Amino acid sequence: MPADNEETFEHFRMHGWMRVRAAFSVDEAAAMRAAAWRALAKVGIRRSDPSTWTKERPEHLQSVKDDPAFRAVGSARLLEAIDAALEGQAYEKPKHCFIGRAEEHGGIALQVVENTGAAGDVILLHPLVLHVATPNMSKAPRFLLSGGVDLPSMWTASPFRGIDD
């Protein structure tokens, strides 16, 4: 694999994010979607009725994370990737924080990376990398599970250690 491949730990160290393809199976992803739909039904959003899909960010869904279907998120493949990318290492400021489309905000030059994936893919993202959700332009709902990995080494050392600006 080339050194800049988005699936390498070197890419994570350089850019602050990496892709873990097939961190869990398509069937496990389907079970998580089914659990999410069950939770959404409790707040009036029905899978079979698109007219109920009007709320962009439904609330009161915290209990869905306790559904057994979500245990697959802690797959051995994903945990190995997290351990390899982060364990015992203080975070270093990415040399190329973003790639792709150039933007500017408040006089600060930014570049935007648009990530998509297949069911079961995971994007590991360092918490110091700016990120935002984008509008869903498709006719189908989009499901995204967001969670955190908190390692003391992420916060005890300067994130800019050893990087010349």
Image: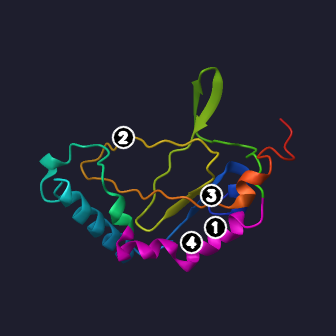
Q: In the image, which disc is placed on residue 78?
A: 4
Coordinates of residue 128 in the picture (x, y in percent):
64, 45
The single residue placed furthest to the bottom in the displayed view is 76
Viewer-proximal residue, 150 or 95? 150
Mark 3 or mark 2: whose residue is earlier in sequence: 3
Viewer-proximal residue, 151 or 26? 151
Q: CA distance from mark 2 to mark 4?
A: 27 Å
Instruction: For label 3, count other residues whose C-alpha is less than 10 Å away and answer few (under 14), some (14-19) or many (20+).
Output: some
Coordinates of residue 24 in the picture (x, y in percent):
46, 74
The residue labelled by disc 1 is 82
x 28%, y 53%: residue: 141
Residue type (three-letter) at the residue carrying disc 4 = Leu
Q: Secondary structure at mark 3?
A: loop
> Which of the two marks, 1 or 3, is nearer to us in this view?
1
Coordinates of residue 11 in the picture (x, y in percent):
69, 56
x 24%, y 43%: residue: 55
Which range of residues does the magenta coloring cover?
66-89
Mark 2 or mark 4: whose residue is earlier in sequence: 4
Q: CA distance from mark 3 to mark 2?
A: 23 Å
x 25%, y 53%: residue: 140
The residue labelled by disc 3 is 6
Mark 1 or mark 2: whose residue is earlier in sequence: 1
Q: CA distance from mark 4 to mark 1?
A: 6 Å
> Which of the two marks, 1 or 2, is nearer to us in this view?
1
Q: Secondary structure at mark 4?
A: helix
Residue 79 within the segment the image draws in magenta:
yes
Quadrant in the picture for the C terminus: top right
Mark 1 or mark 3: whose residue is earlier in sequence: 3
Quadrant in the picture for the N terminus: bottom right
Residue type (three-letter) at the residue carrying disc 3 = Glu
Q: In the image, which disc is placed on residue 135?
A: 2
Residue type (three-letter) at the residue carrying disc 2 = Pro
